[in-house]
Image (cartoon, rainbow, N blue to C red):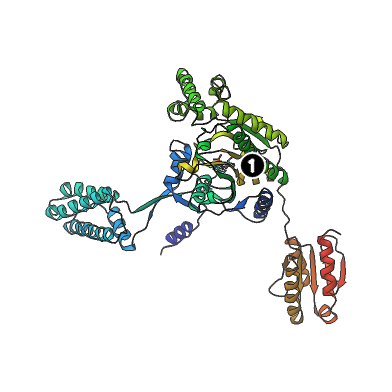
Amino acid sequence: MSEGAVKKEEKARKFQAIKGTRDLLPPETGLWNRVEQTAHQVFATFGFGEIRLPIFEPTELFARSIGAETDVVSKEMYTFQDFDISEELLHLWRLLFTSKDPSKYEEVMALARLGGRVVHTVRAAFEDGQVSRTPENLSAVDNIELYATKLPGIANQGTRETSPVAAALRDAVTHLDFGDEVTLRPEATASTCRAYIEHNMQQLPQPVKLYTIGPMFRRERPQKGRYRQFYQINAEVLEATRKEVASGEWRVASKELEKDAAVDAEVIEMVMTFFERLELPGVQLDINSIGHAADNCRRGYVAKLREKLQEVKDQLGEDSRRRIETNPLRVLDSKLEHEQPIIEKLPRIADHLCEDCKAHYAAVKKELELRGVQYQENWRLVRGLDYYMRTTFEITAKGLGSQNAVCGGGRYDGLVELLGGPPTKGIGFAIGEDRLILSLQESGKGAVAQGRDVYIAWMGENARATAVRAAKNLRSAGFSVELPPVEQKFGKALGQADKLGARYALILGDNEVASGEWTLKTLATGEQGKFTETQLLEFLRKGRSGE
Ligand code: HAM
């Protein structure tokens, strides 16, 4: 290989994390662990249990829950075909799919043979159930066969004749559907509802309170606080209910509404408690009610809103204009400056809520006040996902710039039913963990204990065994210990201990081993003392508990 080629190869090998993804490194991961540990603790005190969900699910699950017209589903999902077929078929399919236009007689014949093999293999896969006999698949195979058998007859007539047939053959192969379309989860609510249904959780004592922590994926334009792989701490409360209650037809409703409102408020109280425990700065809670889709209040409001938006259509930007038809509520979300005065004059949902939604919203506010949770009403808070009804809320924090929503959530009665489960109420939220961490760091609340407790500076063969034993005993007592694998001169060892931010250096040389009295140096002060092993453990324990 020439020098240039070697250099090029070396350059190509320098992989980098994909745009919008990133590595989380120590010591920052210490902060992530602290945040997650606090979530486990706080959520447990509210009776939540952890659920761990798959990273990918059928695309249809998200499309149906979140809504086909939302940004998340229409633009941001990582979707791919999950081929569940033999290696051989996949290989043949790829060969055909990526085949070049044949020019020579032999190439045309080879392509014809490849087409024939694909037909044969797919038909065999129909027989053993590997590939489904859908009308699309059946017609795709027929077409592949048609073009593959046509090719030999025109093989020596030149590319003018063969190219269109080869292109038709490639096109036919794209219509083969070998498996489920799957998507990397953009959020966790849909999956939690899927799991609730799959595991018959309606048979458990209700409500079922679940939380999950993990990565989500959205193909958004990366910027500060916005990533393509980001992390959420997501909590949901699900409660199977009588059909009449779920549909809003059951008019003993006032007790039901009060109960729902208390659940909403408790969920919000939980996330606020969590933020308080972490000392997150500048927390602000916005709440709203977007009404009930089954009652006329939301439908009536959306119709009015659409009507008004039509009147001012010419003054709106492109996105808002499109949304007049697809999802007029989302116009309220617009951040475009010139649209703000127009939006301020639009009809407000609060003036159109039905009696039940109004009572529910009033009860939520009362329940929040009862819990000492401070909030601000925001009539424009509609949220970007379709499943919400009645309560919506969002929490912002300091130090985040334009992406300052650190948590979003709301009520979604009916979603479980939409996914094929029993009538069920739901309320939950997701915290953007990346943003939470950023905000903690920007405010100086992100410090994590670093460094080791003890660096063992040992020298001489006699000291080696003692050092290994000391490390083992100190570690089992819970201290973090650095044991250099080879002996070092004491000066170098102490320098290394300093660099690693160790609190103490335990000095073990021939003298210490012989006398059983070990030397411990406190690195910050330079103080030194002699201890037996038992005394040392006691001394360190006292230091740890701050006595
Ligand atoms: P969401 O508002 O789409 O709601 O996301 C919740 C939070 O996740 C946001 O407030 C933000 O902090 C964070 N987040 C979203 N996208 C990104 C991104 N690209 N980069 C960094 N952070 C991001 C939901 O996901 C709902 N499933 C919440 C929910 C649960 N509603 C009911 N239950």
- Quadrant housing residue 409: top right
Q: Farthest residue to the front: give it.
A: 252
Crowding around mark 1 (Cα neighbors within 10 Å: few <14, some 14 to 19, many 20+) is: many
Q: Which residue in the rendered view is the most extreme toward the top?
A: 311
Q: Residue at image x 20%, y 46%?
A: 164
Q: Residue at x 38, y 52 (%)?
A: 180
* Residue 334: x %, y % from top left: 53, 29
- The quarter of the rendered structure image containing the C terminus is bottom right
Q: Residue 393: x, y in percent?
A: 60, 35
Q: Secondary structure at mark 1?
A: helix
Q: Left of 537 or right of it: where is 38?
A: left
Q: Quadrant of the N terminus?
A: bottom left
Which residue in the protein does label 1 denote?
267
Q: 162 and 416: which one is in front?
A: 416
**Can see residue 401?**
no
Mark 1 C-beta to ligand 1 under 8 Å: no
Q: Is residue 489 left or right of residue 255?
A: right
State whether residue 537 appears in this view: yes
Q: Nearer the viewer, residue 215 or 251?
A: 251
- Total count of labels: 1
Image x and y of residue 101, in percent? 23, 51
The disc labelled 1 sits on which kind of residue? Val
Depth order, front residue of 286/43:
43
Ligand 1 is located in which of the four quadrants? top right
Q: How far across and how far down the image is residue 452, in percent?
A: 74, 63
In the image, is residue 121 above or below residue 79? below
